[in-house]
Amino acid sequence: AARLPLLALADPQAWHQAYARWLRRQAWVATALAALAGAAWIWGDSLGSGFVLMAGLLLGAALGLPVLLNGLLSALLGRSRSVLGQWFLADCRQQLPALSLALMALLLALAANIGAGSMTAGFRQTFADWLEQRLSAELYINPQTPAQAQALQGWLPEQPAIAAVLPVRQVALQLQGWPADLYGVIDHASYRQHWPLLEALGEQPWTQLASADTLMLSEQTARRLKVRLGDRLEIPVPVGQWAPQVVAIYADYGNPRGHLLVNAEHLLAHWPQLTPNRFNLRLEPSAAAPLVSALQQRFGLDDSRIVEQAQLKGWSSQIFERTFAATAALNSLTLGVAGVALFISLLTQSQSRLGQLAPLWALGVSRRQLMLLNLGQTWLLALLTLLLALPLGIALAWCLDTVINVQAFGWRLPLRVFPLQLVQLLALAVLATLLASAWPLLRLYRSQPADLLRTFAHED
């Protein structure tokens, strides 16, 4: 590929034949990788097949990039009417073999930035919405002992500042060898309003949870245990057998343990001595501070046992931000590497480019115009690459959200696209392209007429 521009000067017919063979080889390999990605998507059901899908998608798109760029430039060339415009587009096609690796690196860097950025920003938005819905109580009380839990259960409903007391009972168990937590909750409107469900059996799953022998479970628990809506799940109990029906599946992001919900009365039927291990309190935010003081004075609860909603959300957000702190740095690094690759490619071919530019200079095109034409060619190739990177990046985000995330963690993220983020990334990529082409263009602008004349030194 690197020798094709030189071959264009020595033997144009041989160049066309070599160029066609190069395009066919690129198209064949790209098609094979696309077929591999399709096979991994259709028949694969593991994290390994997910990575094969993602690798086939990225490598197939990268190797197919020159073929697509050649097709776009050929279409534009057929519409051009000016001689200089036809040379501009034909010369862009001639540069494709030499710049293909740099443009592939730029495509992969942009797609990775779009995919990872969309997944991270989408996870942040989804996680924030999920926290707003799930953390609806203003105070969370964790008693120290079962005796203290019984005392709190009698004292809390008597406080006029508390609008609702939602006791939560918990049992740790093993489901098919996987650690899980079974929670018993009371029937209350707060759960209906603030506990989002991904899937539900019927229109009133909370009513079914309160009245029938049913349960709800998290998405990753359902995937791990391979249960669906309407199935019955066997739960180990101290005496007898218990197999409640699954009536709903909900999201529970980031929890490494299984998470299940049943009605508190059904839980107490199998664990009658179980006391609440947490109380979720609904009250006005202004009444939280006096109530915290009363709890500390009466029950001796320290700050670790009394958690306010804002504090809990703050902890969760800090953990999230620390988890994805390296994403922005990695995105910038990949884009920087692509810019360096483009710079090296342009610098390497800058000397050989004089052979293509010398005839234009001899026909009266100034060095300033030559510089602008070269800049326009670089930007045209980069812009077409950027446009092709958009659907590839969105496809990568879909792969991360719906395949990799599901196989790795058991839960799926909704695909979210942020137009402002895409515009900022494209602007940054254009700037990186400009910086990469600045030094080769400056060398061309500073070249002397004698440098261009030397290209004709061996002409007969």
Image: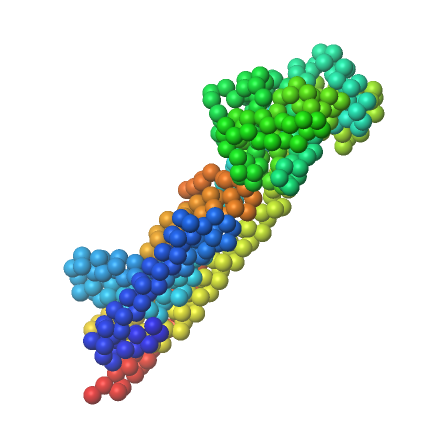
x 26%, y 87%: residue: 458
With 230 as the anchor, is 23 left or right in this view?
left
Quadrant for the C terminus, please. bottom left
Please count the marks in the image: 0
Q: Where residue 267 appears, x then y in whole percent?
A: 67, 23
Q: Name the foreground residue: 429 vs 360.
A: 429
Q: Where residue 312 appears, x then y in whole percent?
A: 66, 32
Q: Where residue 440 appears, x then y in whole percent?
A: 39, 70
Q: Is residue 278 visible?
A: no
x 38%, y 59%: residue: 33
Say above or below: 159 vs 113.
above
With 111 as the anchor, is 170 left or right in this view?
right
Q: Where residue 245 appears, x then y in whole percent?
A: 55, 26
Image quadrant where residue 72 sits: bottom left
Q: Is residue 142 visible?
A: yes
Q: Name the foreground residue: 229 vs 407.
A: 229
The structure's colour scheme is: rainbow
Q: Name the foreground residue: 361 vs 209.
A: 209
x 27%, y 62%: residue: 70
| Outermost residue to the left | 81
Image quadrant where residue 283 sits: top right
x 50%, y 28%: residue: 230
Quadrant for the N terminus, please. bottom left
Q: Name the foreground residue: 185 vs 224.
A: 224
Say above or below: 28 vs 267.
below
